[in-house]
Image (cartoon, rainbow, N blue to C red):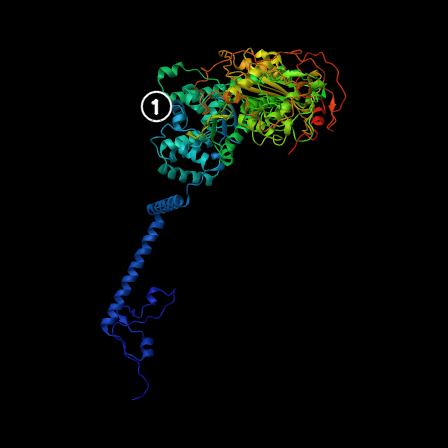
Amino acid sequence: MSDEPQPKKPRPGWASHEPQAADTPDDARDDTRTDAAGLPRSNESDGEADGQGEPGPASAKTGASATAGASAKKAAREERRAALKARRTGWRRLVPTWRMVLGAFLVTALLVVGGFLLGYTLVQIPAANAAATQQANVYLYADGSVIARDGEVNRENVTLSQISEDAQHAVLAAEDRDFYTESAVDPLAMVRGAWNTLTGKGKQSGSTITQQYVKNYYLRQEQTVTRKVKEFFIAIKLDRNQSKDEILEGYLNTSFFGRGAYGIQAAAHAYYDMDASELDAGRAAYLAALVNAPSQYDVVAHPGNRAFVEKRWNYVLDGMVDEGWLDPAERARLTFPVPKRTTLSTTMSGQRGYIVNIVKQHLIDNKIVDEASLDAGGYRITTTLQKSKQDAFVASVDDNLMDRLDKKNRKVDTYVRAGGASIEPRTGKVVAMYNGIDYVKQYTPNATRRDFQVGSSFKPFVFTAAVENGSRTQDGRRITPGTHYDGTSERPVQGWAGPRYAPENEDHEDYGDITVSEATDKSVNAVYAQMAVDVGPDKVRKTAVDLGLSPDTPDLDGAGPSIALGVANASVLDMTQAYATLANHGKHTPYTLVEKVTQNGRDITLPERHTRRAVSREAADTTTSVLKGVVEKGTATAAQTSGRPAAGKTGTAEEDTAAWFAGYTPDLATVVAVMGQDPVTAGHKSLYGAMGLPRVNGGGAPAEIWGQYTRDALEGEPVSSFSLRLQPGADESQPPAPDSSGGPSSSGDVSAPATDAPDDEDTDNGTPDDGSSTGDDGSESVGENSTGGTTTGSPTGDTGDGGGTGTGTGTGDTTGGGTTDDGGSNRDELPGPGGLSGALDGRRWD
């Protein structure tokens, strides 16, 4: 036997597993074949190759049977295919079978469901777009009428409760009557809208209110497939996260209604000048119709479209009736509500821009609303300004100043500016302001600027300080309205440790021995400069600040005796507050410009304002008694046109760059200033020759403006008289000192008044200092009695033009002179060009 391995005999049923050619016939792949009799026969080559004999009978039979079965199945399949092909000829071959339809349906359903789930997962509710959140700040008069709206977008969001039910129902009837019962999206409506658009029946989106709100608030307005897909999914999610009321409220606040109005509140004002809460069914239906085509449906801008608009309006009303939101009888009575052609302007022109900026700064300074929040918008600010008084102020300035200017023929008239403010003394509310002819032409607010001298309108603060501090003259006499002073022009002040100071009176007029009351009527500089030294400049400054001037007032500190002549640059509004404190018997209430502030219906807390005792009642009331004489027989007789008891003081800045009148009645304190400013360089300019007059002073246009405004502002209100409680001896005349011809004695310390005066302890007279007004009306009243002293000189003050110039060398020499003017204007306090600067010798001392 050979050592080589021998091939094993195959087991029964074994068959070769070698791969066969793909194109080999099935019967050729069998390892056995049949003969003509159908019997299997051995593959001779195979037998020879492997050295084996023929397979056994059982194995051959099994292989033959399997092969026959496979061949039969294949043949059957081929027969069926041939039969189908024979039947599906021609067009039948293009019709899908039910298996194909079913398969396509299943695939499509899987794709739709998968796409929906994918889109719902991927598309998130985004943050609101910037345009949708922008709102205007709305500024209102005290009566609720609109002053102005600021901001790039005219929108004021309101809550659903602030929108009338008629307005809510009208919009639903116009846009989505099934809003409260349907889902967030309506695919059938979307298809119908697309079909109507394609067939020329008008551009229709088929979107629900929820979808429209999503487009307005979260997305942009472009017509793209991507935007529509996002809108679809966001609407579904939003409907799950917000209530229907919230969605409707958002929709009403974001929809565009034309005329630049976004949201129904802005639209109600733009078309009908009313709040959304006041809209009735007729007006609401018109606004609802606008949403469909805002620019085309404005019947004022496009009167030719009225018939079509009325058809849409009727459609809305009929829908309200169908839904049970409107009574048919009421519907029958309605007529088309034509919107106003012009509504109240909300631009920044006229006084509006000034008011908006001043009120905004007031909110920021008082920490009511910060600047960033105001810029974001959405605030509804009710001011203390009263429309009737505001209009009266503008009319008075126009009548007594602006209409008298000839800017074409007088260059000086192009310099003229005016500022004014008016405050209720008891409440501190600013009820009117005048800032300039037009914010878009002159943007600097003249009521709040602090760059013009107040002139002699500051003098009352000096006298108030004297009474408040029980001050005395250099020779020890207590300062009262009847105290005599030397009124000689350019008389050096006594008791002043600084450089020599010898102010000149207007037009160098010498008054000689004169009482404080007379010196106030005629605004005698020599008397008040001396009084400032007698009181102490620091005490004068403190009193002025206590009354209402800002401690940051330019040139208020370190002015020395010149403080009495008004070198400080206080604002008109600050001066008004100080005079209001005098009118309120010495009680100071910080002024306010704001009555109420809300944001999206939420009230903003306003800071508390506390009334405090600034000066004693005797000090304030005695000053009032003196200032009454200025109006009755002094430099401000023009203010008598108010027709009411009044007190006040005129003032003129150095070189006549500004003229002032500050005055008050028991019910209203008002300050008016006329200023000179170059419109190109913004530099201060003298007003000599303005309005065709030799000069402008406080007793002219400012007092005339004050008189007319006060008369009109208080029209219909009861006439009130001053109820005054004066310092003891205020109505008595104090004779001058024996050596008064040489001026008050310089002996004695000005900062330490005599302590043996028996009347000092009576100064306060038991007036409560707690800020309470209790007892004011029942106090001892001097009524209309004038204080002591005799009147000298002409009450109209017909004096020269004050062209003199005083030197500041300490010699007291003066040069120049003036011509007499018979124009009849009320001359007041300061000299002509260069007069004050020469007398001040540097104007200020530290």
**Can residue 297 be seen in the rendering of this structure?**
no
- Front in this rendered view, residue 511 or 138: 511
Q: Nearer the viewer, residue 453 or 839?
A: 839
Vertical relation: 642 (above or below) 744: above
Judged left or right of residue 407, residue 341 is left
Q: Position of residue 655 (x, y in %)?
A: 70, 24
Looking at the rendering, in which quadrant would you find the N terminus?
Answer: bottom left
Determine which quarter of the picture holds residue 682.
top right
> With 657 as the anchor, is 146 left or right in this view?
left
x, y percent for residue 447: 58, 25
Name the residue beneath numbered marker 1.
Answer: 323
Nearer the observer, 830 or 109 = 830
Residue farthest to the bottom, as pictured: 1
Q: Position of residue 427 (x, y in %)?
A: 48, 22
Tag 1, which secondary structure? loop
Q: Which residue type carries mark 1?
A: Glu
Screen quadrant of the C terminus = top right
Tell me, yes or no, if residue 321 can be seen here: yes
Q: How many marks?
A: 1
x, y percent for residue 799: 70, 14
- Relative to residue 635, is residue 371 depicted above or below? below
Q: In this view, does 612 lie above or below 126?
A: above
Q: Quadrant of residue 596?
A: top left
Please report the residue visible at 70 percent of the width from the left and 26 percent of the height from the top.
839
Q: Is residue 604 left or right of residue 835?
A: left
Q: Nearer the viewer, residue 277 or 554?
A: 554
The 10 Å Cα crowd at callout 1, few under 14, some 14 to 19, many 20 or more, is some
